[in-house]
Image (spheres, rainbow, N blue to C red):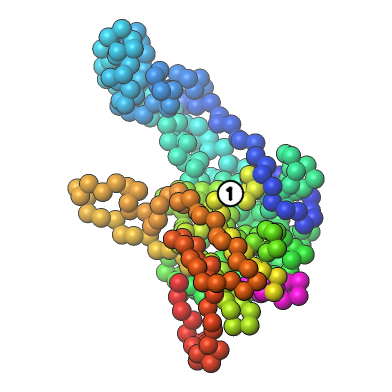
């Protein structure tokens, strides 16, 4: 269930979402649950949760394997030896995820794994795109899971249409400027979805239409809080507008992910659309979202880091700003962003319409 409410056609603003504090760890022993202070299970040196193997010095300080050598010097040269008892306690201490109210049913998570679990939890909450003003004042304060957010946006609070698009295919949309954000839902091909298994956590995408000088800046982000987790799906996209044989495109090899707790990510790429590319009060946008495939894991023992097995880098690289073109831009591109003019052969497009090009 989400929190908050409200409506209106607001513009994304930088609003920090209140962090959900982590509960105190606990251990179940003899059928009883015993609570522990978190600092008892944190490394005396780096203050991070202790993970086996754990070491203890003569002064009874518990330290992790990374801090063992450094702590010996800081603690008067006392030797740190392995503590099997501390290992047992650290492995038995659990905390709730913290996202149970949003649908997580993981139960107790081992304390030293809790931070990683929360970063990768598919139930981590997202904010409504209509969030505006300090602490959400003057905008919508809804916070909830992706499915709850979808229900909230299409419900009476906003009554926004949800646009369903299929991955790997171009979709032509007409997005009214009167609404500065629009929600898309990605849908697998039925055969692909059946082979991969049903995913009840559908992927949401936010298309934002912002003002940038004399142009309309069009951007796309994937709405999910776990976007940097290795298991999170990653996407590429192409945005394009066309007018009188001229075509502007923006190609993004890696779509940014965000929970929208701080508004639109600052590193998001934008396609600047001049006024004479508009169709009345709407943006005639062609959008093509490609779901990236995970790379196969390399054989063990080749010295490849775990990050190298993910489909793309966990954190998107900084995105250079696209150059805002004049009303009829000249050709140009950059390493990550391509805003260019293409003279379209209409007869060729008709011949190839049944077989659109992939990204």
Q: Is residue 22 above or below residue 342?
A: above
Q: Is residue 224 visible?
A: no
Which is more toward the observer, 276 or 218?
Answer: 276
- Picture quadrant of residue 63: top left
- Dot 1 corresponds to which residue? 266
Q: Is residue 120 visible?
A: yes
Which is more toward the observer, 135 or 213?
Answer: 213
Residue under the image location 40 percent in, 18 percent down: 44
Residue under the image location 47 percent in, 35 percent down: 114
Residue under the image location 53 percent in, 38 percent down: 97
- Picture quadrant of residue 177: bottom right
Q: Is residue 283 magenta?
A: yes
Residue under the image location 53 percent in, 78 percent down: 342
Q: Is residue 125 left or right of residue 117?
A: right
What is the total number of numbered labels drawn onto the structure image? 1
Q: Is residue 358 magenta?
A: no
Q: Position of residue 228 (x, y in %)?
A: 47, 48
Quadrant where the C terminus sits is bottom left
Q: Is residue 288 left or right of residue 154?
A: left
Q: Is residue 32 above or below residue 350?
A: above
Which is more toward the observer, 207 or 291?
Answer: 207
Q: Is residue 160 left or right of residue 102?
A: right
Q: Position of residue 255 (x, y in %)?
A: 51, 58
Q: Which residues are magenta?
A: 277-286
Label 1 Cα crowd, 10 Å radius (few <14 / some 14-19 / many 20+): few
SS at badge 1: loop
Q: Position of residue 316 (x, y in %)?
A: 46, 52
Q: Position of residue 149 (x, y in %)?
A: 66, 54
């Amino acid at each position: 269930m989400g929190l908050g409410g409200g409506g209106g056609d607001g513009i994304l603003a930088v609003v920090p979402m209140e962090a959900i504090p982590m509960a105190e760890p606990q251990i179940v022993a003899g059928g009883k649950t015993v609570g522990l202070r978190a600092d008892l299970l944190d490394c005396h040196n780096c203050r991070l949760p202790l993970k086996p193997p754990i070491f203890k010095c003569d002064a009874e300080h518990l330290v992790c394997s990374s801090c063992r050598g450094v702590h010996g010097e800081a603690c008067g040269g006392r030797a740190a030896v392995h503590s099997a008892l501390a290992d047992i306690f650290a492995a038995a201490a659990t905390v709730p995820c913290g996202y149970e109210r949003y649908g997580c049913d993981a139960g107790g998570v081992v304390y030293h794994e809790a931070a990683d679990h929360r970063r990768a939890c598919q139930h981590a909450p997202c904010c409504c795109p209509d969030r505006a003003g300090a602490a959400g004042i003057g905008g919508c304060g809804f916070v909830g899971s992706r499915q709850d957010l979808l229900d909230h946006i299409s419900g009476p609070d906003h009554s926004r249409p949800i646009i369903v698009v299929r991955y790997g295919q171009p979709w032509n949309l007409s997005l009214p400027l009167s609404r500065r954000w629009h929600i898309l839902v990605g849908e697998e091909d039925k055969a692909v979805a059946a082979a991969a298994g049903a995913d009840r956590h559908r992927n949401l995408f936010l298309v934002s239409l912002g003002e940038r000088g004399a142009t309309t800046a069009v951007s796309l982000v994937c709405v999910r809080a776990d976007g940097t987790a290795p298991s999170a799906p990653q996407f590429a996209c192409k945005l394009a507008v066309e007018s009188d044989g001229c075509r502007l495109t923006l190609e993004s090899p890696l779509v940014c992910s965000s929970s929208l707790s701080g508004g639109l990510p600052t590193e998001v790429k934008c396609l600047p659309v001049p006024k004479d590319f508009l169709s009345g009060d709407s943006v005639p946008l062609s959008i093509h979202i490609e779901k990236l495939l995970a790379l196969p894991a390399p054989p063990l023992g080749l010295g490849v880091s775990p990050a190298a097995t993910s489909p793309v880098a966990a954190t998107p690289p900084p995105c250079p700003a696209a150059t805002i073109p004049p009303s009829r831009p000249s050709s140009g591109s950059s390493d990550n962003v391509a805003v260019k003019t293409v003279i379209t052969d209409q007869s060729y497009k008709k011949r190839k319409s049944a077989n659109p090009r992939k990204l």
